Amino acid sequence: MGGASSRTKGHQWEREVAILLRPIYPQARRGLSQTRDGSDVPDVDGTPFFVECKKGKRTNPRAALEQAADAAHTKGDPRPPVAICYDDRERPVAMMYLGDWLDLVGAFHRAVGSKAIPDQAFAPVPTTQAVVLLREALRLLEQPEP
């Protein structure tokens, strides 16, 4: 797949990711590729993350995560970077740094009121309940530790 069609494929994936995130972040939308000064903006904006999206035959999630981290750092954007990658005929993956993931999981556990959740608690949860729990976890992440 060549230049223009690859860009179109990538832009479509950014729109799809924004749509997937809207139940949790109603303001999620595809970002602009660059700002007027040429610096990068997230591929999907309106979330508490600096999102970089990649779609192709074989993406490089680590490179995408580093690209998001570099762009966020350059802009002075404090949001944790996340790479959301979709290889052809594979399941999409989301990648973030371990420290950011631990912060998110810790906030999730505080939101559900338990430091230790039994393994069976991770059975499928209705989407609306999962969205409520994730919103509460993210709200807690924004508050300073007591």
Image (spheres, grey):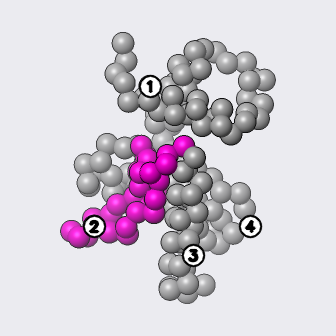
State whether residue 97 appears in this view: yes
Upstream in the sequence, badge 3 or badge 4?
A: 3
> For this view, does 75 lie left or right of residue 119?
left
Q: Quadrant of the C terminus?
A: top left
Which of pointers 3 and 4 indicates the residue nearer the eye?
3
Residue in view at x 78 percent, y 31 percent: 123
Distance between mark 2 and mark 3 Cα atoms? 21 Å
Distance between mark 3 and mark 4 Cα atoms? 14 Å
Distance between mark 4 and mark 2 Cα atoms? 32 Å
Image spot of residue 49 (x, y percent): 43, 46
- Magenta segment range? 24-52
Residue in view at x 76 percent, y 35 percent: 124
Upstream in the sequence, badge 2 or badge 3?
A: 3
Under tag 2, what secondary structure?
A: loop
98 vs 134, nearest the viewer: 134
Q: Quadrant of residue 125?
A: top right
Distance between mark 3 and mark 1 Cα atoms? 36 Å
Image spot of residue 142 (x, y percent): 38, 30
**Which residue corresponds to mark 3?**
9
CB under 8 Å between discs 4 and 1: no
